[in-house]
Amino acid sequence: MRCNTFLFGIFLIFDLSSSVNYVPFMDESGIQSCMPDKKFNRADLSNFMILTKDSQLFANGTIKILHHIQAPLQVRFTTKRRILGKWVDGEFKRFMPNFCITMRSPVESFYQATKELDKCPFEKGQEFHFDMIPVTQKDIDTTSSLLGEWKLKVAIHYTILGDMGDCFISNWEVFEE
């Protein structure tokens, strides 16, 4: 069971609890680059999706690392949500100054997906295969205040022959189950 840094923002914003069950769902556009050249240059995510089943998120597909990534691997997650037809800053943000350390913590929501990961940072050619691997430690329960459309942006900063960064965005909808 292996996972990849580039996906964990998806898991983080929906690991919330309440007594009413609402479910996040990634739309069919999947994971897209938000870099100027419209490429996610460090990883091929074209065969990867996050799926919702039985109120839980699952990783499914394959990710291939295209270039070696050196530590520290800094990851910043931000959200936007649509309110009254306009995209505004969302309530969820997180910065991890060294993801390679954070991913090994059993208190993290994504630990089930990273506990078997043997190398961080990631090396060129490394592949991660997922067959409906749960990416949260519990069912995803959210409040009705989170209903609606969301965008999750994940910005990654690392060193490859100097400072580099990548960025991806995914569109989500939280609906009542």
Image (cartoon, grey):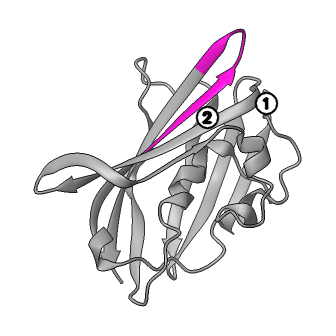
Q: Position of residue 24 (x, y in %)?
A: 41, 68
Magenta segment, which residues? 152-164
Q: Of 19 and 43, which appears nearest the observer? A: 19
State the count of labels: 2
Q: If the image is split into quadrants, where does the C terminus sit?
A: bottom left
| Circles 1 and 2 in contact, beta carbons < 8 Å | no
Q: Is residue 1 left or right of residue 38?
A: right
Q: Is residue 132 above or below residue 118?
A: below
Residue 24 on the magenta segment: no
**What residue lies at 48% left-to-right and 60% top-to-bottom?**
13
Residue extending furthest right?
Answer: 118
**What residue lies at 54% left-to-right and 51% top-to-bottom?**
9
Q: If the image is split into quadrants, where does the N terminus sit?
A: bottom right
Image quadrant where residue 43 sits: top right
Q: Of 167 and 58, which appears nearest the observer? A: 167
Q: Is residue 9 left or right of residue 114?
A: left
Q: Position of residue 147 (x, y in %)?
A: 28, 70
Disc assigned to residue 44: 2
Q: Is residue 44 above or below residue 94?
A: above
- Per the image, label 1 sits on a secondary structure element best described as loop
Image quadrant where residue 106 sits: bottom right
Amino acid at dot 1:
Gly
Q: Which residue is tagged 1?
A: 125
Amino acid at dot 2:
Asp
Q: Is residue 111 above or below residue 139?
A: above
- Per the image, label 2 sits on a secondary structure element best described as strand
Determine the main secondary structure of the stretch shown in magenta.
strand
Q: Looking at the image, is mark 1 or mark 2 earlier in the sequence?
A: 2
